[in-house]
Amino acid sequence: MSKTILLTGAGFLVVAVILGAFGAHGLKDKMSPNMMQIYKTGVEYHFYHALGLLLVGALAMQMPSSLINWSAICLIIGILIFSGSLYILTISGIKWLGAITPIGGLSFIAGWILLFAAIWKHFPK
């Protein structure tokens, strides 16, 4: 599973760079400053959590655990829902998508809590 997590993290980083560049060069003149800021938030969280996947994948190599695997799954879901909804919202203007963004945020939180639990369990004292 660690290889899959690492590859997923690396793949998400490639996509984050592409979407960041697309926003900076292709969208800046087509969106309001408010919408551009929302798009940038999606890119930032996308980057942070893709880097987090690399950390989770590296830890999975050292201390395999279902908690770590679930941590990775939550981070992946978070990227797709949180950042994905912000990308689609800003590009399409579909406002109701903002209502699902917090589900992605909760998924991020769950992912980090699961990682915390995995580390706590692996190093009990």
Image (cartoon, grey):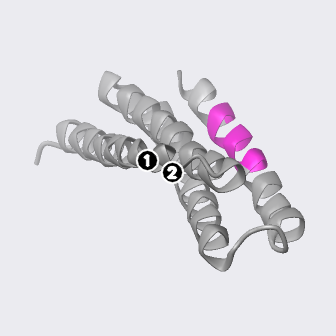
Per the rendered image, the range of residues in magenta is 7-15
The rendered magenta stretch, by its main secondary structure, is classed as helix
Question: Secondary structure under badge 2?
Answer: helix
101 lies left or right of 7: left
Q: Residue at x 37, y 35 (%)?
A: 71
Q: How many labels does the image show?
A: 2
Q: Which residue is outermost to the right?
A: 25
Q: What residue type is labelled 2?
A: Gly
What percent of the width, then of the height, locates residue 54? 57, 45
Question: Which of the 4 image quadrants contains residue 25?
Answer: bottom right
Marks 1 and 2 sit apart, C-alpha to C-alpha, by 19 Å
Q: Earlier in the sequence, mark 1 or mark 2?
A: 2
Question: Which of the 4 image quadrants contains residue 27?
Answer: bottom right
Q: Which amino acid does label 1 sit on?
A: Thr
- Neighbours of disc 1 within 10 Å: few (<14), some (14-19), many (20+): many
Q: Residue at x 18, y 36 (%)?
A: 121
Q: Residue 120 carries which label?
A: none
User: Relative to residue 115, is residue 42 depicted above or below?
Assistant: below
What percent of the width, then of the height, locates residue 19? 77, 54
Q: Give the residue number, with chain letter if any, for mark 2.
A: 52
The nearer-to-camera label among 1 and 2 is: 1
User: Relative to residue 5, is residue 16 depicted above or below?
Assistant: below
Q: Residue at x 76, y 61 (%)?
A: 20
Question: Secondary structure under badge 1?
Answer: helix
Q: Which of 21 and 53 is in front in this view?
A: 21
14 lies left or right of 103: right
Whether residue 54 is visible: no
Q: Give the residue number, with chain letter if any, for mark 1.
A: 101
Q: Which of 82 and 47 is in front in this view?
A: 82
- Neighbours of disc 2 within 10 Å: few (<14), some (14-19), many (20+): many
What percent of the width, then of the height, locates residue 85? 55, 45
